[in-house]
Image (cartoon, helix red, strand yellow):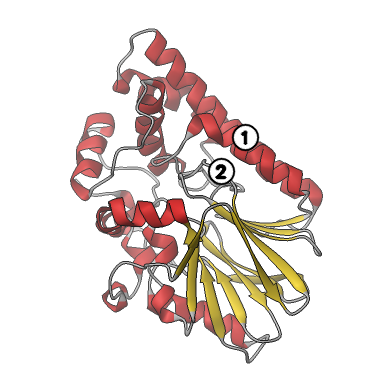
Amino acid sequence: MSFASTNDLAEKAVSFDELGPGLYAYTAEGDPNSGVLVGPDGVVVVDAQATPVMARDVQARIARVTDKPVRQVVLSHYHAVRVLGASGYPAHSVICSDATRALIAERGAQDMDSEIGRFPRLFRGRESIPGLTWPTHSFERKMTQWLGETEAQVIHIGRSHTAGDTVVWVPAHKVLFSGDTVEFGATPYCGDAHFADWPATLAAIRELGAEKLVPGRGAALLTKGDVEEALHQTESYTSDLFALAREAVAKGHGLKDLYDMAMERMRPKYGHWVIFEHCMPFNVSRAFDEASGIAHPRIWTAERDVEMWRTLEGASPMKSAEARG
């Protein structure tokens, strides 16, 4: 048995959109996004991409708008597809939340093996990865970066996609780089999620008042209406799935029962989103665990990935899959 994503070799078209003075979104048709903040002395990149080789394309786009080097990389969370490209930048520092650093220590190696197995295309040039990405600086709740006179707040916004989710907020221009706390037209990956906390995290994001937003996946959002739509989409999907999980657990149903019910009920509304078919088994597994009282997400390994998929999908070919973000 193999993941259908191993056969997905089509490259995505990259967009590099300006959201404000020196603020850019690197997006790729539903593949993982990066953010770019250009200051007078250097550049900050939000989410590094999956490999040093893939980081080169981000730097090539940066070079079109500035000759300044990348001095800092901010990690929105610990997933390999976001962080393992960090060594490809001439950065002086790598920044993440304390909670993200703890997750790298606890499960970073297993996550690396798992993610590469799920979606090789997103790890182009994986031989260039020197190992796990470790931060040079971590913080508990909030830190501030200054790009000249422009303030960029790096905030551990709350638990949602992972326990360490971090956003970068530029209040002067009302621009937010959200990582995978928010998606747009893409299925949230919830295999390491905290479903019960996700609504409060989205409420905290709403309170910031972003008018432009770079989601973890999906197009850059350039209007308040699109920002609100992305928040609504993310909240709707995660809340709907967790409600089904709580219903199933309350009735004494098993994991496979929940999966079949969730696919039947959620596909009409969400099935057209990017990575829906692939994410659902992982998402349902975590929702079932949390509804059953397992507060700390279990670690995904390459072996657990295969075992879970066989349990929920059987040995039949997988349909239209991509990997998590």
Residue named by callout 2: 158
Task: Reply above or below: 26 against 7.
Answer: below
**Residue at position x 66%, y 87% from top?**
41
Q: Position of residue 33 (x, y in %)?
A: 54, 62
Mark 1 surroundings: few (<14), some (14-19) or many (≥20) residues within 10 A: some
Would residue 311 appear left or right of 32 to someone viewing this image? Answer: left
Q: Secondary structure at mark 2?
A: loop
Would residue 50 appear left or right of 57 to someone viewing this image? Answer: left
Q: Which image quadrant for residue 80?
A: bottom left
Q: Amino acid at mark 2?
A: Gly
Q: Which mark is residue 200?
A: 1
Would residue 83 appear left or right of 188 to someone viewing this image? Answer: left
Residues under numbered marks 1 and 2 in contact, where contact means CB atoms less than 8 Å apart: yes
Q: Which image quadrant for residue 100?
A: bottom left
Q: Position of residue 230 (x, y in %)?
A: 67, 45
Would residue 268 appear left or right of 247 to someone viewing this image? Answer: right
The N terminus: image quadrant: top left
